[in-house]
Amino acid sequence: DAKTTQPNSMESNEEEPVHLPCNHSTISGTDYIHWYRQLPSQGPEYVIHGLTSNVNNRMASLAIAEDRKSSTLILHRATLRDAAVYYCILSLNFGNEKLTFGTGTRLTIIP
Amino acid sequence: NAGVTQTPKFRILKIGQSMTLQCTQDMNHNYMYWYRQDPGMGLKLIYYSVGAGITDKGEVPNGYNVSRSTTEDFPLRLELAAPSQTSVYFCASSYLGLTSGELFFGEGSRLTVL
């Protein structure tokens, strides 16, 4: 099964952009890349997902490397509400519903 | 819409007891999931369902059972509770499944087995 590697923790200043990296060197051609975040004492919250092309939505942008072995979640202007654990996850196979979360990156926002 | 609703929010069980964690969603989603999260860890998939009457095992199904008799409800049954089942349990749902849609999570049910 393809695995992801993320830094355990990161810090960023409020109102600045944040780049959260994720390595997935064994990704297969049909694996989607998903990002979720989990605020303290809450269930995870969907952020964004993509397959090959870069993706944007109102929460964030997802930049996917050309070889798909890594990706970066970009929060364009961090706020204190963005402090959370961010999970980078792969769908194991197309149509396979088994999505397993690793330990993620704990993002701290400095006021 | 209430989204995904889990009950109870907290429960303490004695070893060997059984209980059912309830999960209901009002978004007419076909896909539903149960995850568990141990302290300081990520989430692990227990069971999932792609529609009423259809369920399948996830990564850690042992000690649990599920059923999906309606689109709205996906209860998780714990038989013969053990301390290793102490965890926070999250239910989630999705309209189109993982590869083409997002998961919506409930607020979690914190279970302690003593």
Image: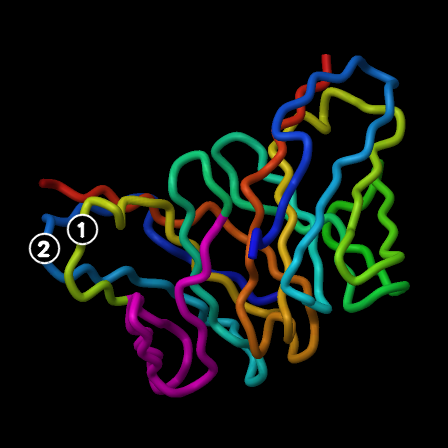
Q: Give B79 or B44, whichever is nearer the viewer.
A: B79
Residue at x 33%, y 44% (from the top left corner): A106
Residue at x 52%, y 44% (from the top left corner): B42
| Amino acid type of the residue that numbered disc 2 sits on in the rendered structure | Glu
| Amino acid type of the residue that numbered disc 1 sits on in the rendered structure | Thr
Span of residues in magenta: A44-73
Q: Give B25 or B84, whichever is nearer the viewer.
A: B25
Q: Badge 1 is on which residue?
A: A79
Res B112 → quadrant = top right
Q: Badge 2 is on which residue?
A: A15
Q: Which mark is residue A29?
A: none
The answer to the question of whether label 1 and label 2 lie on touching residues, with beta carbons closer than 8 A, is yes
Residue at x 75%, y 57% (from the top left corner): B72
- Which x, y percent locates residue B81? 82, 24
The alpha-carbon separation of the residues under discs 1 and 2 comes to 6 Å
Left or right: where A90 falls relative to A58: right
Q: Give B20 or A16, whichever is nearer the viewer.
A: B20
Residue at x 15%, y 49% (from the top left corner): A12
| Magenta stretch contains residue A62 | yes
